Amino acid sequence: NPGNNLHVSNISHKINLSDLETALPKLAGYVVALVGHIALVIQFLLFRRFKRHPHTKKS
């Protein structure tokens, strides 16, 4: 299926399928964690940006 191809550069030719099957789930876990951290940082920054300063609130 052409939509499911994965290109990996700078990988040793000595790597076999078993090595990849072991490494890819670990890598996927790191990617998920990284995306989660990025989402938290974005939420924090947006919250700070749109939070009103106490002296500028309308009463």
Image (cartoon, grey):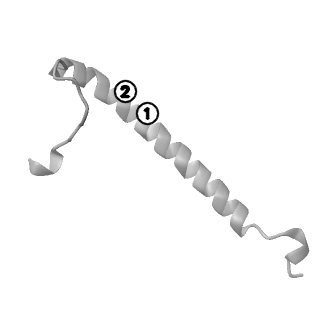
SS at mark 2 in the image: helix
Q: How many marks?
A: 2
Residue located beneath label 2 in the image: 26
Q: Amino acid at mark 1?
A: Tyr
Percent x, y of residue 18: 19, 18
Neighbor class of circle 1 (other Cα within 10 Å; few <14, some 14-19, many 20+) is few
Give the residue drawn at x 48%, y 38%.
33
Percent x, y of residue 20: 23, 24
Residue located beneath label 1 in the image: 30
Which quadrant is home to the C terminus? bottom right
> Do tag 1 and tag 2 residues touch (Cβ < 8 Å)?
yes
Give the residue drawn at x 23%, y 37%.
8
Task: Determine whether, in the image, residue 20 is placed left or right of residue 39.
Answer: left
Residue found at the very far front of the displayed protein: 10
Task: Determine whether, in the image, residue 4 is placed left or right of residue 22.
Answer: left
Asked if 36 appears above or below 53 in the picture, the reply is above
Neighbor class of circle 2 (other Cα within 10 Å; few <14, some 14-19, many 20+) is few
Task: Determine whether, in the image, residue 39 is placed left or right of residue 19.
Answer: right
Q: Quadrant of residue 5?
A: top left
Q: Amino acid at mark 2?
A: Lys
Percent x, y of residue 47: 68, 61
SS at mark 1 in the image: helix
Give the residue drawn at x 36%, y 34%.
28
Q: Nearer the viewer, residue 8 or 30?
A: 8
Q: Quadrant of residue 19?
A: top left
Percent x, y of residue 3: 15, 51
Asked if 47 appears above or below 5 in the picture, the reply is below
